Structures are given as structure tokens and as C-alpha cells.
Amino acid sequence: MTCEKRPPAGAGTSAAPRKLFIKSYGCQMNVYDSHRMADTLAPAGYVGTADPADADLVVLNTCHIREKAAEKVYSELGRIRKLKEAAADAGRRMVVAVAGCVAQAEGEEILRRAGSVDLVVGPRSYHRLPEMLARVEGGAKVVDTEFPVEDKFDILAGPTREAMRARGVSAFVTVQEGCDKFCTFCVVPYTRGAEVSRPAAKIIAEVERLADAGVREVTLIGQNVNAYHGTGTGGRDWTLARLLRRIADIPGIARLRYTTSHPRDVSDDLVAAHRDLPALMPQLHLPVQSGSDRILAAMNRRHTRADYLAVIDCLRAARPDLALSSDFIVGFPGETEEDFRDTLGLVDAVGYAGAFSFRYSPRPGTPAAALPDQVPESVKEARLQVLQAAIERNRQAFNARCLGATFEVLFEKPGRHPGQLVGRSPYLQPVQILAPATRIGELDPVTITQVGANSLFGTLAEPGAQAHTPSPAAMAMGA
Ligand code: SAH
Ligand code: SF4
Ligand code: F3S
């Protein structure tokens, strides 16, 4: 992701414009943080560039979730080093910063392994960037991987109206950061720190500004978003459900989503929000990781397969057209063929509209990395193939059931062909449609006429057409 960011109109800075290239890896929270960093650096004269060779400041906002992610960063840093040398030959200084979860986990090790890096900053310290850059300009190498007590979002700048416009009709807003769950395979509690929730008033103000700039769909994000417990506007803590109800009232916001949730934190009031709030889209990413109770216990997920299915039953009772997606890990230490079959069975039992699946990757410092019975890579790979085929079969079955359905599509951007727009269905599927660009930002009923491999195709429904979604009973394919 590259931030195309201009300084706010009239932000009278005397500094000459400097070019900023930011690349984000990993999850949506990194994308959100990258935007905040660009917004915060804008008053100092930084403008976005899509070309790292051209940049005065390169920021890699990294992800540590699986092995290859960190390796990709080191090879990217190798390429950046050459650009930095070329800039130096041309008499120009290029500052290289590593942010994100690899920065937090590796700290000074990054300076040792990649000499071109000037600055290493962990995810909770981005508000200190301007001051850190000043120290780099003075010739220092700077590492900050503390978990400061102050909240970075109180200090980081919000986007200008122009920047919000450039980012489109659908926006992400971080409401919660960090994780206290400590699944035994996962680095996030170490890289993002303990769970913290932003105060509701700050979130509401941010969403109001987004709505004002034309945003129609907001996705509230957090590593454990449904553990949200921020201070409410009356001084008492609010749950995620309470926050969703309040945001649903903001004029202009037509669609709400939240991600990523943990099955243990699906509270009764959240289920009720799914029942009561038409703006809350009938699509939920609810990672389960495994369908085997033995493996779920070893993962420290603190829920069983039956608990997970019971949560889904409650959600579907409240919102019958709810589509689900999930994350799965195959080859967790000690996973047998039987455990794996339990996972496959769960995929069909839920009838997911989509899912991500990963080979277990031992992460340094996590308890599972030290477990005996690590599964050979060849076995992980074979299981991944089988699992992905099952997920794909379910995804296609779900998409096929959308044929003939009429639902509201949010038109997001021009399509590949002239006269075509791309929008999103309530279930997050891309929908291609012939419609004028003036409809971008609108929600209109669309009838699905064709189902492609990765997107749906539709036509604008007759005026006044009623939404008619795939039949509820058909949602749980294998049920
Ligand atoms: N907070 C989210 C997930 C964050 S990480 C949650 O609790 O669900 C996103 C996904 O990466 C996880 O759901 C998991 O499927 C995967 N993942 C995390 N650590 C992993 C590891 N060590 N190996 C393989 N996949 C992993
Ligand atoms: Fe990682 Fe588990 Fe926390 Fe999700 S809930 S971020 S998988 S430790
Ligand atoms: Fe990756 Fe950190 Fe997000 S490890 S998935 S960038 S929380």
C-alpha cells in the first residue's frame, strides 16, 4: 500500500516538500497505521510518492505473523539499500525506517542485519516519529520498541478531508489494539502488546469526519475487536455492540462491519446487534483455527468446536442470512490425520463463504514453537491443499447460491472496462456492473446474473426492487 498524501490545505509549512514512500504488509491495522503516519508527517512537508527510488523517507510497515513475512522484509530492505546508495551517489539522503510487528519483535537486530536502516519503530510508538526523524537527521540511529503509556491515537494526526476522499467510500477505523489471549502459536500479543480500547468519543468523531467526506461503509478493526471495552460517552465502558449501535446512527454511514473477532467474545449484546442493526452487514470473519478439540486446547484458544458451533447457531438465529469466514492453521504441533479430518468436517458443517488457511509457522518465543511433535512441512503442505480445496468448494457453492439474488451493492470504483463499476455485496464479494461513475458511493439493489471465479456480475434492479438474499437455509451448506 502506498499512501498518496498531500499536506493539509493551508498547513503553512516552511519546510521544502519531502517525499514519503510507505509500504504496508500484513493486516488492515498496518494499513490504518500507515495512513496515520502519513497524516502525522504531512505537516512537516512530507508528500506521498509511489516510487521508493524517489523518496526521502521510506517506511516499511511490517508483519511478523508468519516466517515468510519477515524474510520478505529483509529482502525488500536489500532492494532499498541499493536505492539508498543510488540516492547518496546523486547527493541526496534517503532515510529508511522499519515500523510494524517485525520492528517490535526484532528491534536492534534489524539495524545489525540491515545496515541501511536508520530507524526502527514499534506499533505503539508512531506518534513519536517526527521527533525520532529529527534525531536521525542529527546523525543518530534510533530504535523505539517501548509500549508507552500514552495512546498513540491521541497524538497521531487524523486525515485531512482530501486524504479521506482519496481513500474511497469504504474506510477502516482502529477501535482496539493488542491482544491478551496468548494463543500458543501467535506473536501478536508480544508485538502489539496488551489489549487497549480507544475511547468511544474519539471513534465517533473520526467516523463522523469520514461520513462527512463521503465514506459510506466503516469497518471497525482490532486484533480482538469484540473484546472492545472503551470508555463510553457517559464515562462508563462500552461494549463493541454499544459502539456499533451508536455508529449506526451517524448520518451517511450505511454499512458497518468489524474484524477480527474471537469466538469467546461473541457476547449476547453483540448477537442482538446483528439482529437489530440493518447497517451491520451479514458477514462475519470468525477465526476458529482448527476443528479438533485436542488441537484447540493445545492452541490455548479456550473454546471447543461445540462452543464455536453454538456461537454460530446464535448468530444465525439472530441474522439468518449471515455468511461466515474464518482462518485455519494446518500442521499445528501434534496434529494427527484425525484432528485434521475434524477441521475438514467443520468447514462443511459451517459452510463458509470463504476462509484463509495457513501452514503452521513456528514463531520465535511462542510456546507452540517449543512443543514436541512438530509436523513435517510435506505433511503441512498436503493438508493445506486438501483444506483449501474444501474451502474453495464451499466458497463457490456460496457464490452459486447468490445467482438470481438481489441485494444492495456499494459502488466503490471504476471497473476494468469502460462504463463498468466495481462494488461490494453485503458478503464482501466484488460485484461488476455496467453503471455510470456518478454512482460511486451509492448503494443500489443489484440482481446477480452471473457468477465468475472471483467476482459476481449483476444488473441494476428495477427501481423499488426488494432485497432478496440467498435463502437462509441454504447458508449452512453442510448443515
Ligand atoms: N486476531 C486474530 C488473528 C490475527 S493473525 C484472531 O484472533 O483470530 C491472523 C491469522 O494468522 C490467525 O487467525 C491465524 O490463522 C494465522 N496465524 C497466526 N499465527 C500463525 C502461525 N504461527 N502460523 C500460521 N498461521 C498463523
Ligand atoms: Fe493471536 Fe490468538 Fe490474539 Fe488472535 S486471539 S491475535 S490468534 S493470540
Ligand atoms: Fe502482522 Fe502484526 Fe497485523 S504480525 S497480522 S501486522 S498485528
Image (spheres, rainbow, N blue to C red):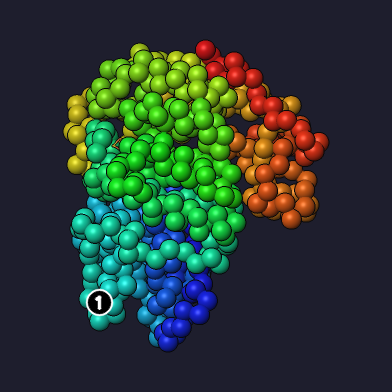
Judge by depth and name the residue closer to the eye, 380 or 402: 402
Residue visible at 45% across and 56% down in the picture: 206
Q: Secondary structure at mark 1?
A: helix
Question: Against 188, is 382 above or below?
Answer: above
The answer to which quarter of the image holds residue 84 is bottom left
The answer to which quarter of the image holds residue 407 is top right
Judge by depth and name the residue closer to the eye, 473 or 362: 473
Query: Is the CB–ligand 3 distance for label 1 below 8 Å?
Result: no
Q: Is residue 253 left or right of residue 470?
A: left
Asked if residue 80 shows in the view, the reply is no
Residue visible at 60% across and 36% down in the picture: 426
The answer to which quarter of the image holds residue 156 is bottom left
Q: Is residue 335 left or right of residue 285?
A: left
Residue 467, how many percent across, how many down?
69, 30
Residue visible at 68% across and 52% down in the picture: 440
Residue type at the position of mark 1: Arg
Judge by depth and name the residue closer to the eye, 402 or 298: 402
Q: Which residue is mark 1?
A: 135
Asked if residue 16 shows in the view, the reply is yes
Q: Is residue 91 left or right of residue 211?
A: left
Question: Against 118, is 465 above or below?
Answer: above
Q: Residue furthest front?
A: 234
Question: Against 340, is 286 above or below?
Answer: below
Judge by depth and name the residue closer to the eye, 22 or 267: 267
Residue 209, how many percent across, how many down?
50, 59
Residue visible at 50% across and 40% down in the picture: 257
Q: Circle 1: is it few (<14), some (14-19), or many (20+) Cα within 10 Å?
A: some
